[in-house]
Image: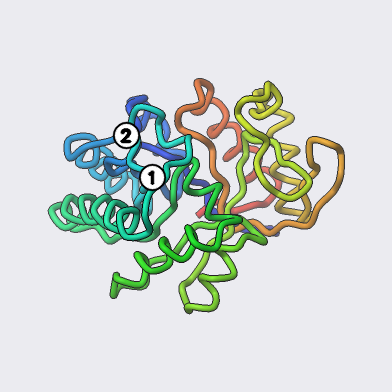
Amino acid sequence: MELFHVDINADVGEGIDNEAQLMPFLSSCNIACGGHAGDEVTMSKVVKLAKEHQVKVGAHPSFPDKENFGRQAMDMSCAALFASIKHQIDSLLVVLKEEQVDLHHIKPHGALYNMAAADKKLAEVIIEVVKTYAMPVQLYVPYGSVIADLAVQHNIPIVYEVFADRNYNDDLSLVSRAKKEALIHDIDEMFEHVYRMISMREVKTLDGIKVPIRVDTICVHGDNVEAIKLVENLWKKLEEKGVKVY
């Protein structure tokens, strides 16, 4: 009996070249489109794989900073950031049109994603970019975030995202990658972390506090060296528990 259903996504096209192994265990993916990683060649390759495996495709725009992989804040004007995000998504749209694949969603990357969860100005820039697309594009956002609230106000469909391989702080922000506890490496620990969020609608934070959360999609970072093993195990264990992945 199916008790719950959930989407599993991964950030791809980031130079790891493990997409062929990841795709069988994903239902959506977020393709780097030139900001922190990726170019026309990588986008085309990953879109073809996603199409082959019937995986929904999303754009994964970032601060334009390949040197730091989009993981550091950049001091940019709202106009410059808008132009950069728009250019990145449009670059992916060119590839999608060639492959006759629809853009399913947009998910900001790295520092841009984390900062927009709390910074209204940054969130507004992203919202304004999303509004330029006539198609019903969904926005992947953290639960309880500023950007989620803004998206709802602007009638943008949202998908609440959680991270399978990351620990959380009490305010639902992700534990900084500068800390050794940021990433979850143990397969069983990761499954318990995810299943609690799905079945109990709460996350156990690094300090042991249980905080309410909602889950529509689960991200396993594609640049995690154990990503393939983690996502395969997660998919299988979820289905054993009656959680349908699609």
Q: Mark 1 sits on what residue?
A: 62
Q: Nearer the viewer, residue 33 or 10?
A: 33
Q: Position of residue 110 (x, y in %)?
A: 48, 40
Q: Position of residue 197 (x, y in %)?
A: 73, 50
Q: Are marks 1 and 2 in contact (CB under 8 Å)?
A: yes
- Mark 1–mark 2 distance (CA, rounded to whole Å): 9 Å
Tell me what residue is drawn at x 58 percent, y 53 percent. 161
Q: Nearer the viewer, residue 233 or 221?
A: 221
Q: Quadrant of residue 125?
A: bottom left
Q: Is residue 195 left or right of residue 51?
A: right
Q: Is residue 201 left or right of residue 156?
A: right
Q: Is residue 133 above or below residue 69?
A: below
Location of the N terminus (image quadrant): bottom right
Q: Is residue 44 above or below residue 243?
A: above
Q: Quadrant of residue 100?
A: bottom left
Q: Position of residue 236 (x, y in %)?
A: 60, 38
Secondary structure of residue under mark 2: loop
Amino acid type, callout 2? Ala
Q: Nearer the viewer, residue 183 or 55?
A: 183
Q: Mark 2 sits on what residue?
A: 37
In the rendered picture of this protein, how many numbered marks are placed on residues?
2
Tell me what residue is drawn at x 24 percent, y 50 percent. 92
Q: Is residue 233 above or below residue 144?
A: above
Q: Residues within 10 Å of mark 2 (few under 14, many from 20)?
A: many
Q: Is residue 98 left or right of residue 19?
A: left
Amino acid type, callout 1? Ser
User: Of callouts 1 and 2, which one flags the residue occurring earlier in the amino acid sequence?
Assistant: 2
The chosen color scheme is rainbow
Q: Position of residue 143 (x, y in %)?
A: 64, 59
Secondary structure of residue under mark 1: loop
Q: Is residue 171 left or right of residue 24?
A: right
